[in-house]
């Protein structure tokens, strides 16, 4: 497993897998015990920062395999002294399989997952049967799964997996709305895509 690199101390906003094994205890991991939502592949953290600001009565856990991006997000959270947002550096599938209690998450957000364009790299894509099983494992009954992408072919894969799984119910996704300012987007990828006029494909499912 990756070790936390030297530099600015960002705990508790950034930790590695080894820091939280063998199990995540929400009551001690966050300052307050309240509903938890996952930001899977949180990247630079625009959603994590905005959502935790807007919903102080919800705890948000970001997961990011790229330590550089994860630490960048954690620095933003540390600057704000954000009590209800944290980032784990490491593989999201490992966290969901090994460290999170079953049915303990209110929602999972998966925004603009890496499309791995080359055919030989497709097996690295996040969304597959195993990932859907992990969503079923961690999300509470009645909890939500959100996923957006600007890659039509990948959205077909995602919606195909989710729409044909009896464990999840497809719901109407939120309508696109005009942003009020340059940070009023779900993620930086959404901002870039919409500035270029690229359509965003949105999916929403209930467990």
Image (cartoon, grey):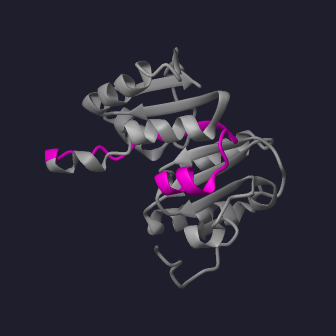
Q: Residue furthest right?
A: 32
Q: Is residue 116 visible?
A: no
Task: Residue at 58% x, 39% y: name it.
Answer: 137
The x, y position of residue 178, in whole percent, is 51, 25
State left or right for residue 142 relative to residue 184.
right
Task: Residue at 60% x, 64% y: name it.
Answer: 74
Q: Is residue 120 visible?
A: yes
Q: Residue 168, relative to residue 182: is it above or below?
A: above
Q: Which residues are magenta?
A: 93-119
Q: Is residue 169 magenta?
A: no
Task: Residue at 31% x, 29% y: name it.
Answer: 157
State left or right for residue 152 relative to residue 101.
left
Q: Is residue 108 magenta?
A: yes
The x, y position of residue 40, in whole percent, is 51, 47
Q: Nearer the viewer, residue 149 or 128?
A: 128
Task: Residue at 53% x, 85% y: name it.
Answer: 6
Could you say which quadrant of the image residue 106 lies in? Answer: top right
Q: Nearer the viewer, residue 164 or 45?
A: 164
Could you say which quadrant of the image residue 47 lies in? Answer: top right
Q: Residue furthest left?
A: 119
Which quarter of the rendered picture does the C terminus lie within? top right
């Amino acid at each position: 497993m990756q070790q936390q690199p030297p530099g600015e101390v960002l705990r508790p906003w950034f930790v590695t897998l080894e820091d939280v094994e063998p199990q995540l205890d929400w009551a001690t991991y966050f300052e307050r015990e309240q509903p938890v939502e996952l930001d899977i592949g949180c990247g630079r953290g625009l959603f994590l920062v905005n959502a935790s600001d807007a919903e102080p009565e919800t705890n948000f856990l970001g997961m990011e395999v790229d330590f550089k991006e994860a630490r960048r997000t954690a620095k933003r959270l540390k600057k704000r002294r954000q009590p209800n947002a944290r980032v784990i550096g490491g593989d999201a599938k490992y966290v969901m399989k090994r460290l999170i209690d079953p049915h303990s998450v209110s929602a999972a957000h998966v925004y603009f997952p890496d499309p791995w364009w080359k055919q030989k790299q497709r097996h690295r894509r996040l969304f597959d049967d195993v990932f859907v099983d992990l969503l079923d494992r961690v999300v509470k009954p009645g909890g939500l799964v959100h996923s957006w992408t600007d890659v039509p072919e990948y959205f077909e894969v995602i919606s195909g997996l989710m729409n044909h799984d009896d464990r999840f119910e497809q719901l109407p996704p939120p309508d696109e709305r005009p942003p009020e300012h340059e940070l009023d987007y779900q993620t930086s990828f959404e901002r870039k895509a919409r500035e270029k006029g690229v359509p965003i494909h949105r999916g929403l499912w209930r467990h």
